[in-house]
Image (cartoon, rainbow, N blue to C red):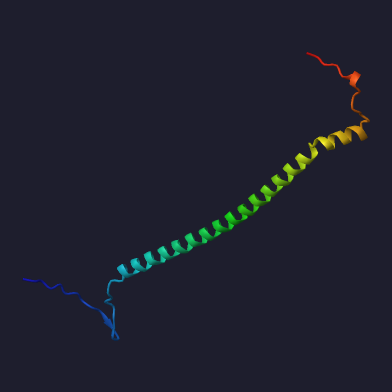
Amino acid sequence: MSETISRTVVKINGFSLDRPRLTPLFVVIALVSLLSLLFVWSRIEAINLEYDISSLQTQIRAGQEDVRRLRLEAAHLASDSRIEGLAREQLSLQLPAPGQVIRVN
């Protein structure tokens, strides 16, 4: 046999104080809101990381250009013809005469 649980319902001016339970609905709404906020936060973080990556790639390209320029400058500064010209002009050095070279073993 089934039992019927009777509840007393209070009515004031036609307004019933008996409300359906809204707790499950509020829990679902809170979870959906939380998941939405989590999704938006993760997308914002992803976009910020993309900006950071782009900035770092720009810095890497600038650094690579500096390395290329410095290697070119080092090759120019170490060239034999440049060093020989500076030795002749600034230090007044000359090639040795054949009798001035002494070989040491």
Residue 97 in the image, given as x and y percentages of width and height: 91, 23
User: What residue is drawn where x is 32% and y is 70%?
Assistant: 25
Residue 3 in the image, given as x and y percentages of width and height: 10, 71
Q: Residue furthest top?
A: 105
User: What residue is drawn where x is 70% and y is 44%?
Assistant: 67
Q: Quadrant of the C terminus?
A: top right
Residue 9 in the image, given as x and y percentages of width and height: 23, 78
Quadrant of the image occupied by residue 12: bottom left
Quadrant of the image occupied by residue 72: top right
- Position above or below: 77 against 66: above
Quadrant of the image occupied by residue 87: top right
Nearest the viewer among 26 and 54 is: 54
- Position above or below: 1 against 43: below
- Position above or below: 78 against 32: above
Residue 15 in the image, given as x and y percentages of width and height: 30, 83
User: What residue is drawn where x is 26% and y is 77%?
Assistant: 18
User: What residue is drawn where x is 70% and y is 46%?
Assistant: 68
Nearest the viewer among 19 and 39 is: 39
